[in-house]
Amino acid sequence: MSEVHIEIDDRRSRPPSPFAAGAVEDLLAIAQQGAMVSNLAFANQVRNTDLAGQTQLARQQGMSRLRLAILAKAASQVQVASAKEARAAVEAFSGNETAQALADLRAVLAGSR
Protein backbone atom coordinates (compact mmCIF):
# COMPACT_ATOMS: atom_id res chain seq x y z
CA MET A 1 0.00 0.00 0.00
CA SER A 2 1.15 3.50 -0.79
CA GLU A 3 1.11 6.30 1.63
CA VAL A 4 -0.94 9.48 0.95
CA HIS A 5 0.35 12.71 2.34
CA ILE A 6 -2.30 15.45 2.90
CA GLU A 7 -1.29 18.97 3.85
CA ILE A 8 -3.83 21.63 4.85
CA ASP A 9 -2.91 25.19 4.05
CA ASP A 10 -4.72 27.57 6.40
CA ARG A 11 -4.79 30.90 4.54
CA ARG A 12 -6.60 32.72 7.31
CA SER A 13 -3.55 32.65 9.49
CA ARG A 14 -1.42 34.34 6.84
CA PRO A 15 -1.77 38.07 6.19
CA PRO A 16 -3.27 38.91 2.80
CA SER A 17 -0.89 39.96 0.12
CA PRO A 18 -0.55 43.71 -0.55
CA PHE A 19 -1.73 43.14 -4.12
CA ALA A 20 -4.97 41.51 -2.95
CA ALA A 21 -5.60 44.24 -0.37
CA GLY A 22 -5.04 46.96 -2.98
CA ALA A 23 -7.34 45.25 -5.44
CA VAL A 24 -10.10 45.00 -2.84
CA GLU A 25 -9.74 48.69 -1.98
CA ASP A 26 -9.90 49.63 -5.67
CA LEU A 27 -13.02 47.54 -6.16
CA LEU A 28 -14.62 49.09 -3.09
CA ALA A 29 -13.83 52.60 -4.31
CA ILE A 30 -15.28 51.82 -7.74
CA ALA A 31 -18.41 50.37 -6.16
CA GLN A 32 -18.93 53.48 -4.03
CA GLN A 33 -18.51 56.00 -6.86
CA GLY A 34 -22.12 55.70 -7.96
CA ALA A 35 -23.37 56.47 -4.48
CA MET A 36 -21.01 59.42 -4.16
CA VAL A 37 -22.15 60.87 -7.49
CA SER A 38 -25.77 60.40 -6.48
CA ASN A 39 -25.15 62.12 -3.14
CA LEU A 40 -23.40 65.02 -4.87
CA ALA A 41 -26.25 65.40 -7.36
CA PHE A 42 -28.82 65.42 -4.56
CA ALA A 43 -26.81 67.95 -2.55
CA ASN A 44 -26.48 70.13 -5.65
CA GLN A 45 -30.24 70.03 -6.26
CA VAL A 46 -31.01 70.87 -2.64
CA ARG A 47 -28.60 73.82 -2.77
CA ASN A 48 -30.06 75.08 -6.06
CA THR A 49 -33.58 74.89 -4.63
CA ASP A 50 -32.42 76.77 -1.54
CA LEU A 51 -30.78 79.49 -3.66
CA ALA A 52 -33.88 79.82 -5.84
CA GLY A 53 -36.01 80.30 -2.73
CA GLN A 54 -33.63 82.91 -1.35
CA THR A 55 -33.63 84.76 -4.68
CA GLN A 56 -37.43 84.77 -4.83
CA LEU A 57 -37.63 86.04 -1.26
CA ALA A 58 -35.14 88.82 -2.03
CA ARG A 59 -37.18 89.84 -5.08
CA GLN A 60 -40.40 89.93 -3.06
CA GLN A 61 -38.78 92.01 -0.34
CA GLY A 62 -37.34 94.38 -2.93
CA MET A 63 -40.74 94.86 -4.58
CA SER A 64 -42.33 95.46 -1.18
CA ARG A 65 -39.73 98.10 -0.33
CA LEU A 66 -40.18 99.74 -3.72
CA ARG A 67 -43.96 99.92 -3.29
CA LEU A 68 -43.52 101.38 0.18
CA ALA A 69 -41.04 103.97 -1.09
CA ILE A 70 -43.36 105.00 -3.93
CA LEU A 71 -46.30 105.31 -1.56
CA ALA A 72 -44.25 107.30 0.94
CA LYS A 73 -43.06 109.67 -1.78
CA ALA A 74 -46.58 110.16 -3.10
CA ALA A 75 -47.96 110.80 0.38
CA SER A 76 -45.12 113.22 1.10
CA GLN A 77 -45.79 115.17 -2.07
CA VAL A 78 -49.50 115.40 -1.24
CA GLN A 79 -48.83 116.53 2.34
CA VAL A 80 -46.17 119.08 1.44
CA ALA A 81 -48.04 120.63 -1.46
CA SER A 82 -48.52 124.35 -1.02
CA ALA A 83 -51.83 126.05 -1.64
CA LYS A 84 -50.65 127.25 -5.02
CA GLU A 85 -49.58 123.75 -6.08
CA ALA A 86 -52.83 122.24 -4.80
CA ARG A 87 -54.89 124.79 -6.74
CA ALA A 88 -52.85 124.13 -9.89
CA ALA A 89 -53.29 120.38 -9.50
CA VAL A 90 -57.05 120.70 -9.08
CA GLU A 91 -57.29 122.95 -12.14
CA ALA A 92 -55.15 120.56 -14.20
CA PHE A 93 -57.18 117.52 -13.22
CA SER A 94 -60.60 119.10 -12.89
CA GLY A 95 -63.50 117.12 -14.16
CA ASN A 96 -61.95 113.65 -14.12
CA GLU A 97 -61.37 110.72 -11.79
CA THR A 98 -57.80 111.68 -10.95
CA ALA A 99 -58.95 114.99 -9.51
CA GLN A 100 -61.58 113.22 -7.44
CA ALA A 101 -59.03 110.66 -6.17
CA LEU A 102 -56.62 113.46 -5.27
CA ALA A 103 -59.35 115.35 -3.42
CA ASP A 104 -60.35 112.18 -1.54
CA LEU A 105 -56.73 111.51 -0.59
CA ARG A 106 -56.29 115.04 0.72
CA ALA A 107 -59.52 114.75 2.69
CA VAL A 108 -58.33 111.52 4.30
CA LEU A 109 -54.99 113.08 5.17
CA ALA A 110 -56.65 116.17 6.59
CA GLY A 111 -59.00 114.02 8.66
CA SER A 112 -56.15 111.98 10.14
CA ARG A 113 -54.32 115.02 11.56
Image: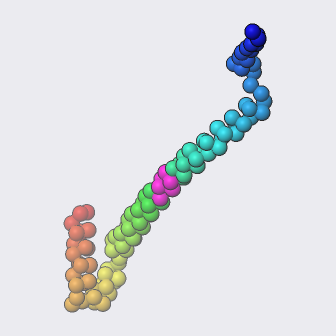
Asked which quadrant contains residue 17, the reply is: top right
Residue 35, quarter of picture: top right
Membership of 104 in magenta stretch? no
Image height check: is 64 above or below 89? Answer: above
**Residue under the image location 32 percent in, 87 percent down:** 88
In this rendering, position of residue 107 left or right of residue 59: left
- Quarter of the figure with the N terminus: top right
- Front-most of residues 78 and 1: 1
State the image quarter where residue 2 is shown.
Answer: top right
Residue closest to the eye, 69 or 14? 14
In which quadrant will I find the C terminus? bottom left
Residue occupying image coordinates x 25% and y 73%: 105
Q: Position of residue 34 (x, y in %)?
A: 58, 47
Q: Is residue 55 above or below residue 106?
A: above
What residue range appears in magenta?
45-52
Between residue 46 and residue 19, name the one nearer to us: 19
Which one is nearer the viewer's eye here, 90 or 14?
14
Residue 90 spot, x, y in % from top left: 27, 85
Q: Is residue 69 visible?
A: no
For the view shown, which residue lies furthest in the front direction? 1
Q: Could you tell whether 19 is left or right of 71 in the image? A: right
Residue 60 can be seen in this image: yes
